[in-house]
Image (tube, rainbow, N blue to C red):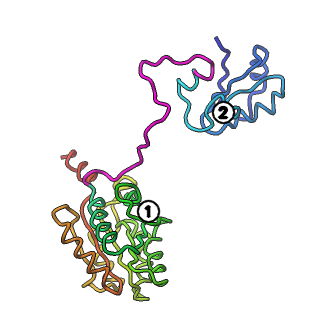
Amino acid sequence: EYPVLKIGQYPLPKKQLHQLIESCDEILVLEDGQPFVEKQLKGYLGIGVKVKGRLDGTLSQDGELNPDSVARAVGKENKSEFGIPSVVEMRPPALCEGCGHRDMYITLTEVLKEEYPSHKVFSDIGCYTLGANAPFNAINSCVDMGASITMAKGAADGGLFPAVAVIGDSTFTHSGMTGLLDCVNENASVTIVISDNETTAMTGGQDSAGTGRIEAICAGIGVDPAHIRVVTPLKKNYEEMKQIIREEIEYRGVSVIIPRRECIQTLARKKRSK
């Protein structure tokens, strides 16, 4: 019913465009992404042909095209058997059920919110960044890889207590060790939580350079071994974890807490492969 020109090249095919506009006085541009071709056509065709698309509001200015949106644009509403609500409930990403990061955040936030109302938690880049979302609402900042430890140190130097950093095992070996070294050199009063899921989970489960060696690395950098605490983040260990968190927050120096439990997704893949 409508003449169609599919463009798969640039510069625009002028000959085919001239043939198209000879038979119509309106052009609807169906273009995923930014309206690049639509802008070019408006200048190329002049005012004689009306160009419709994302720019004039015929199509949504963002998002993907689909059969329903195109049908509305050409005046043929798609009579779908199942209606699509105009407002879709938000479904933000969340930590997996059974993830050790969840248990870490539950215990950490209980201690901090109940006993240290002036606290700040500086997080880093990884799955655990999702601790910023409900129901945890656990972190105050996330800037870039490695920033958690250095920001916590800066806050502690400025008088904040307690200053807590949360970083993952793979991010720690990527760009967190230098921040820890700075903390040790300055004997900063910071509590660093290295949430160790024994993999680089966010990008597909690659091996981490520090797997199984995080406490040895921290000791090698200069952290007092008495204040490198390894815990297993499970519900049955909550009281033990909270007591360790309290003790290390109260220690006026560099302390490292390592909640260690294998990524739940990695564990599931291993079980399926057997």
**Residue 76, located in which quarter of the rendered image?**
top right
Residue 41 at x, y percent in the picture: 76, 31
Q: Residues within 10 Å of mark 1 (few under 14, many from 20)?
A: many
Span shown in magenta: 72-98
Residue at 50%, 31% in the rendered image: 86
Residue tagged 2: 54
Q: CA distance from mark 2 to mark 1?
A: 35 Å
Circle 1 sits in a helix, a strand or a loop, which is it?
loop
Q: Is residue 126 magenta?
A: no
Residue 27 rendering spot, x and y as whole percentages: 72, 22
Question: Which residue is outermost to the bottom?
Answer: 186
Q: How many numbered circles does the render carry?
A: 2
Task: Left or right? Give the position of 238 relative to 182.
Answer: left
State whether the magenta stretch is mostly helix, strand or loop.
loop
Is residue 8 or residue 153 the one in the foreground?
153
The residue under label 1 is 125
User: Residue at point 63% right, 37% down?
Assistant: 61
